[in-house]
Amino acid sequence: MWYNRLSEYLLKEGYTNDAICPCVFIKNTISEFVVFAVYVDDINLIGTPAELKKATDYLQKEFGMKDLGKTKLCLGLQIEHLTNGIFVHQSAYTEKVLKRFYMDEAHPLRYLSEPHKARSQTGYVFICGGAAISWRSTKQSIIATSSNYAEIIAIHEAS
């Protein structure tokens, strides 16, 4: 019900509803724009300063909403507003996963392969009846020019 009311209100004001993603509303002028991204009861606004001000005033007038400032978290993504752009990351989620699997105290190590050699590691395990009967892990004998080519080499060497 709330979405229908919001949608009607925005369309009446001249916003267009995105055909692919109905939760996105856009309003463009020659030099200004604003984009509404609606998710359940949250709205993220992106746009030029003048249009953002008009949009927030317009919403506050009809719905009594309050501006919570710049988005810091959206759909699990952390958003940091920097002077030269926006940095999007999931470090809190990564830390949560590491703690869940008791890896938050693990110590990182530098890689052991030689990246300047551009050779991938190849390995295989042959299993029979649930038990490993043969395995091998080695640096590939030739240089692959793509990850797809490295996989083809690995299949060839395993066979």
Image (cartoon, grey):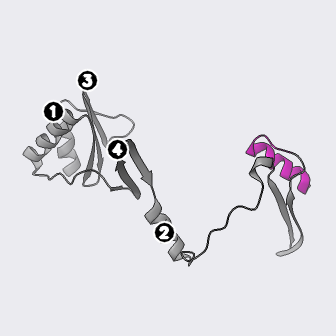
User: Residue 60, position in %: x, y?
Assistant: 11, 47
CA–CA distance in space, label 1 to label 4: 35 Å
Disc 4 residue type?
Answer: Thr
The residue located at (76%, 44%) in the rendering is 148
Image: 92 above or below 65: below
Residue occupying the far left of the picture: 61
Task: Decide whether residue 148 is among the magenta residues.
Answer: yes
* Residue at image mark 3: 31
Q: Earlier in the sequence, mark 3 or mark 1?
A: 1
User: Residue 142, position in %: x, y?
Assistant: 88, 46
The residue located at (38%, 41%) in the rendering is 84
* Quadrant of residue 77 within the rendered picture: bottom left
- Other residues around mark 1 within 10 Å, as few (<14) / some (14–19) / many (≥20): few
CA–CA distance in space, label 4 to label 2: 26 Å
Q: In this view, does 3 lie to the left or right of 19?
A: left
Q: Nearer the viewer, residue 151 or 90?
A: 90
User: Residue 159, position in %: x, y?
Assistant: 92, 55
* Residue at image mark 2: 95
| Camera-nearest label, 3 or 4 | 4
CA–CA distance in space, label 1 to label 2: 44 Å
Residue occupying the far top of the picture: 30
Confirm or deny contact between disc 3 and disc 4 (CB under 8 A).
no
CA–CA distance in space, label 2 to label 3: 42 Å
The residue located at (39%, 36%) in the rendering is 20
Q: Earlier in the sequence, mark 1 or mark 2?
A: 1
Secondary structure at numbered mark 1: helix
Which mark is on residue 83? 4
The residue located at (16%, 43%) in the rendering is 56
Q: Nearer the viewer, residue 145 or 126?
A: 145
